């Protein structure tokens, strides 16, 4: 009798443990089920790893990235290298992302140039662009285009880094940016830019930036408009709408630039470190009316771009989760466009059309 009682007690404990495990997993299962019932997303901007110096290879992280994105009904993701400075240890780009895209065809595509074009932009003063430098720049861009790139990026116009990378700045009308616009137009590929909005000269904001930085930020919107005007056939993607560190990337500024430049497109990002004033969300993750009106006015000019780093996703997957929340907050017609359909006419993705 004592043996029977012991077996019954152990059986009851196992059932309780199984029940607790299911209860613990329930929120994730509910989230996954809800995501599967909503619009499938193509994430237009994410990073497989921060850098390879930390021991994480892009290929090894890809399986984990797929697990996370599948749970949130992200059908495909465009990977980008961060905007690396010259000789940055652990930089990666075309060859590494090309391999991931080939291994997981239809699930990953890539842009490149953050590891190659970006250092050239940073290291070449605008008045020191020689024919030899221009030719080398074109050669690298064409290697990306001919290697299957969906676009060029991530390239820094104004990049604070927040202590993770150095401060980087290059004028948007740099001669090499104009050269890239011509290459991009020829290959029907976009140029993707990281640019904090600086509509006027202003003190550098206190955002935890380490290392060398200017005391005063120089106005950069006029140079950005010169790039947009230079070759109207070149699509320019201004990354990270909804997340900025100057507090100046407002809806009125974005609407005016979109109105004036038909070749301007944007990806939308959200995380806890950006300015709440320019975030797309109200408390509770409903959409701000001004944001909804802007998306209604320019429904074909936006895509989601989480800017997620997948090698740190166990600690912080909020960016891709917030992209899911953004799409779910949109009316169904806009959810389809912003969440998925616009990507195919912004990036060079014929297989995903």
Image: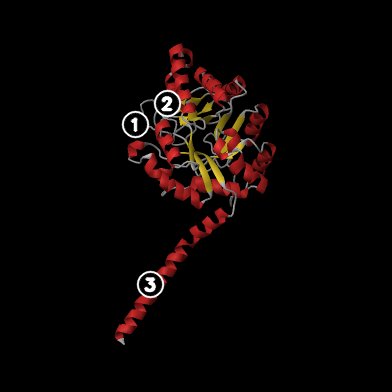
Check disc 3: other Cα within 10 Å, few if <14, some if 14-19, many if 20+: few
Residue 203 lies, with reference to residue 58, above or below; the image says: above
Q: State the quadrant of the N terminus.
A: bottom left
* Residue drawn where x is 38% and y is 72% of the image: 14
- How much space separates mark 3 and mark 2, taking CA atoms? 56 Å
* Residue drawn where x is 67% and y is 45% of the image: 333
Relative to residue 24, is residue 280 drawn left or right? right
Check disc 2: other Cα within 10 Å, few if <14, some if 14-19, many if 20+: many
Looking at the image, the residue that sits furthest to the left is: 3
**Label of residue 116 in the image:** 2
User: In this view of the protein, can residue 299 be seen by the observer?
Assistant: yes
For disc 3, the marked residue is 14
Residue 81 on image: x %, y %: 44, 34
Q: Nearer the viewer, mark 3 or mark 1?
A: 3
Disc 3 on helix, strand or loop?
helix
For disc 1, the marked residue is 89
Disc 2 on helix, strand or loop?
loop
- How much space separates mark 1 and mark 2, taking CA atoms? 13 Å
The reply to whether discs 3 and 2 touch (Cβ–Cβ < 8 Å) is: no
């Amino acid at each position: 009798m004592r043996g029977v009682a012991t077996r019954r007690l152990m059986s009851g404990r196992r059932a309780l443990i199984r029940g607790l495990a299911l209860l613990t997993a329930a929120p994730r299962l509910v989230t996954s089920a809800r995501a599967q019932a909503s619009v499938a997303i193509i994430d237009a901007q994410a990073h497989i790893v921060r850098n390879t110096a930390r021991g994480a290879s892009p290929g090894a992280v890809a399986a984990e990235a797929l697990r996370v994105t599948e749970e949130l009904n992200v059908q495909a993701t465009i990977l980008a290298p961060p905007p690396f400075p010259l000789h940055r240890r652990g930089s990666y780009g075309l060859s590494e992302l090309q391999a991931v895209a080939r291994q997981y065809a239809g699930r990953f595509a890539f842009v490149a140039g953050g590891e190659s074009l970006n250092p050239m932009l940073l290291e070449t003063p605008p008045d020191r662009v020689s024919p030899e430098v221009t030719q080398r720049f074109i050669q690298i861009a064409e290697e990306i285009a001919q290697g299957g790139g969906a676009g060029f990026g991530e390239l820094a116009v104004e990049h604070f880094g927040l202590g993770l990378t150095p401060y980087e700045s290059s004028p948007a009308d740099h001669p090499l940016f104009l050269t890239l616009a011509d290459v991009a137009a020829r290959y029907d590929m976009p140029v993707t830019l990281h640019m904090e909005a600086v509509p006027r000269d202003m003190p550098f904001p206190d955002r935890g930036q380490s290392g060398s930085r200017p005391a005063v930020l120089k106005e950069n919107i006029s140079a950005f408009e010169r790039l947009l005007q230079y070759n109207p056939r070149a699509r320019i993607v201004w990354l990270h709408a909804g997340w900025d560190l100057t507090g100046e990337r407002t809806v009125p500024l974005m609407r005016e630039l979109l109105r004036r430049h038909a070749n301007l497109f944007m990806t939308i990002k959200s995380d806890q470190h950006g300015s709440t004033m320019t975030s797309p969300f109200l408390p509770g993750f409903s959409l701000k009316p001004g944001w909804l009106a802007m998306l209604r006015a320019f429904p074909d000019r936006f895509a989601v771009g989480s800017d997620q780093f997948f090698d740190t996703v166990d600690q912080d997957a909020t960016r891709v989760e917030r992209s899911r929340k953004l799409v779910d907050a949109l009316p169904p017609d806009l959810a389809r466009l912003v969440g998925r359909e616009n990507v195919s006419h912004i990036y060079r993705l014929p297989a995903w059309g």
